[in-house]
Structure formats: structure tokens, C-alpha cells
Image: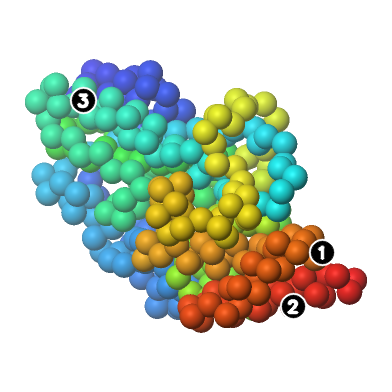
């Protein structure tokens, strides 16, 4: 159905998607094989997401039993950062400055609406463990797999959030994969602060800061200094990636959460933290996960002479939560070491 296919893809482009494409209803490979393999090798750490049930996440029929094709869409979230604040603050990964997935879902639903109006079913999936969006997008011809395991979209790089529309419409699938654009480049390997990229496309979640700062487990002591000022996520392998380089983009939206003031964070109640930051992935919806990472950030970047920070760390050092007390004591030791030069 080439006319319907083009109408669907045009609706996505008109809604702001920077890349769109269609793929078949087949099992998503290499995602299925790699998820099982890397889970067995212990490279998933405590990460769940699509690792929880690889067979489900790699089968489009899990989202719609009558699936015929899957439409992929990419939303560009490149934005320019504002000036760094003077107060000690934790840095937030660019994709989480605002809820870009909300914009993505609206754009995906624009394609879904065309399908529904034509009498077909259309199920929108974005940031959903039910389907491996990167594999869908790769097969649909939106981009190639970078060595950092991100999908790289020509002209945009990896600064995209991805989603899918699973449908029973017999659309025309892509049959032209995008050529690899990485070549011999290894900048993402060299730019990773913890050497988490073991081989092209193979990431050890137990070393990846993007996971360590938001996962439920204690941050390993050997990686706490490498956390630096990262409160949520890590963009380092994207920042050094040549296809992802950009110098012109819209300024961050006024409501963007590019950094979070540590003084505010340490004084906020559970409800205040979740009200402001609850759209992030927070393991077990436990605000202490954010506080734990913030304690490490404070040890790394706060002024060792800041009495307020010192008092705060002392308070958390006696917290009944063993993660908070452990990370606070480490942070105190880190401040002392930095003060001593």
C-alpha cells in the first residue's frame, strides 16, 4: 500500500519527526540474540527494561498480535545548554531536560491517526519495555548502530528519542539499511570515563555511568570520582561522537531541567523531589536513589569549605538508609581529600 505508507510517513514528518521508516513484523534481530547473550554474560547489571523479557521485547506481536508492519520515528532533542549555575549543581543528560518523549508520542500518534482513519489498528510505543525501538529504527532505515550502541541518524547523530507504531496495515517496508558511518573511529571508546564500551555495540551496564547514577544499587567506589557532576544520565560518548557534533540548535526550553541545585535537592521532601523530577526513571520510585547520587556529586564538585554542604553530608552520614550513609561518608572523605590538595 504505497499511498498509505507515504501518507503515514508524511504525517510523521509534518509532526516534527526527523526520520521515519517502516519495517516488517519479524522478530527483532540482532536485539533478541544480544539481549539474551549479554544478560547471560552479566553485562546487564541490575538493569531491567528490555532485558527483563528479551523474547517479549523483540517480538512486535507482543504489542499487537495481528501486526503486519512497524513504523519507526525519531524525535530530535538537540538543544543548547544555558550558562552553568554558580550554586553547586548536578548535571542532567540532555534527553531528560524536558519530557521529549511526550513530543515523540504526539508525533507518533499523528501517524497512528492516519492508520486508524484508514481502518487499521495502530499501537504507539515509546520508552516502553515492550519493544526494542533501536532495532525497529535500524531495520526501518532511520540510521546505523554506532559503536556506543546508540542509533546514529544521518545529520542528527544519536541525539534522538525513538518510538514505534505497531500496526496491522500492510505498509511498504524499508529494504535499504543505512550504511555504517563510524568506520575506524573509536572516539566513544576513548571518551567513556569508565571504559564501559567493551567492543563495538557492547556496553557493560555495570560500568556505564548513565546506568550507575540512576540504578538501584550502590555506585561502585571505583567509579564515584568518575561520576563528577552527573546527577542523571551521561552524554560523554555522544559528546565526542563526530556524527553527533552540533554547533547550532534551539536554546533549551525555559522549563528545561539542565541542572539541579544540590542545596534544593538535599532540602526537598520525597513528595517535592518526585513532583519535580518524577518523570525521570527513578529505581523503585525511591527518591533516595537521587539523593545517593547527589551525595557523590557533592563530594566531587562542592566547595570543601562550604559549611552548608558539610553539615548536610554529616546529617546524611547518620541516615538510617545504609546507601545514603555510605555515600555521604565517602563524599566527606572526598571533600577532605580535595581540600588537602
Image quadrant assignment for residue 250: top right
Label located before the other in sequence (3 or 1):
3
Residue at 21% in and 25% down: 113
Q: CA distance from mark 2 to mark 3?
A: 57 Å
26 with respect to 274 (left or right): left
Find disc 3 in the rendering and name its residue: 113
| Residue 19 screen position, x and y as percent | 44, 30
Closer to the eye: label 2 or 1:
1
Residue at 63% in and 55% down: 263
Task: Determine the secondary structure under disc 1.
Answer: loop
**Which residue occupies the foreground of this view, 332 or 187?**
332
Find disc 1 in the rendering and name its residue: 305
Label located before the other in sequence (2 or 1):
1
Find disc 2 in the rendering and name its residue: 333
| Residue 205 screen position, x and y as percent | 51, 68
- Packing grade of label 3 (10 A; few <14, some 14-19, many >=20) is some
| Residue 66 screen position, x and y as percent | 11, 44
Quadrant for the N terminus, please.
top left
Residue 115 in the image: above or below residue 226: above
Q: CA distance from mark 2 to mark 1?
A: 13 Å
Amino acid at each position: 500500500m504505497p499511498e498509505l505508507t507515504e501518507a503515514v510517513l508524511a504525517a510523521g514528518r509534518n509532526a516534527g519527526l526527523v526520520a521515519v521508516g517502516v519495517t516488517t513484523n519479524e522478530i527483532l534481530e540482532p536485539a533478541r540474540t544480544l539481549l539474551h547473550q549479554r544478560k547471560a554474560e552479566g553485562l546487564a547489571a541490575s538493569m531491567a527494561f528490555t532485558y527483563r523479557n528479551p523474547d517479549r521485547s523483540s517480538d512486535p506481536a507482543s504489542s499487537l498480535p495481528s501486526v503486519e508492519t512497524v513504523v519507526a520515528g525519531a524525535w530530535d532533542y538537540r538543544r543548547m545548554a544555558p550558562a552553568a549555575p554558580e550554586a553547586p549543581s548536578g548535571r542532567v543528560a540532555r534527553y531528560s531536560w524536558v519530557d521529549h518523549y511526550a513530543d515523540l508520542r504526539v508525533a507518533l500518534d499523528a501517524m497512528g491517526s492516519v492508520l486508524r482513519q484508514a481502518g487499521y489498528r495502530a499501537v504507539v510505543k515509546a520508552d516502553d519495555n515492550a519493544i526494542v525501538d533501536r532495532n525497529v529504527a535500524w531495520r526501518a532505515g532511520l540510521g546505523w548502530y554506532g559503536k556506543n550502541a546508540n542509533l546514529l541518524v544521518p545529520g542528527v547523530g544519536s541525539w534522538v528519542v525513538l518510538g514505534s507504531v505497531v500496526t496491522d496495515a500492510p505498509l511498504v517496508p524499508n529494504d535499504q539499511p543505512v550504511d555504517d558511518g563510524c568506520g575506524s573511529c573509536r572516539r566513544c571508546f576513548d571518551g567513556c570515563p569508565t571504559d564501559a564500551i567493551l567492543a563495538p555495540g557492547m556496553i557493560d551496564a555495570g560500568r556505564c555511568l548513565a546506568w550507575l547514577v540512576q540504578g538501584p544499587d550502590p555506585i561502585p567506589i571505583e567509579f564515584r570520582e568518575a561520576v563528577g557532576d552527573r546527577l542523571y544520565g551521561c552524554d560523554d560518548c555522544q559528546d565526542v561522537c563526530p556524527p553527533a557534533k552540533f554547533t547550532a540548535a534551539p536554546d533549551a526550553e525555559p522549563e528545561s531541567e539542565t541542572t539541579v541545585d544540590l542545596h534544593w535537592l538535599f532540602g526537598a521532601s520525597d513528595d517535592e523531589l518526585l513532583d519535580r523530577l518524577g518523570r525521570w526513571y527513578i529505581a523503585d520510585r525511591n527518591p533516595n536513589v537521587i539523593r545517593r547520587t547527589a551525595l557523590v556529586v557533592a563530594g566531587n564538585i562542592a566547595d570543601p569549605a562550604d559549611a552548608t554542604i558539610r553539615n548536610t553530608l554529616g546529617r546524611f552520614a547518620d541516615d538510617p538508609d545504609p546507601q545514603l550513609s555510605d555515600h555521604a561518608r565517602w563524599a566527606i572523605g572526598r571533600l577532605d581529600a580535595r581540600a588537602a590538595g
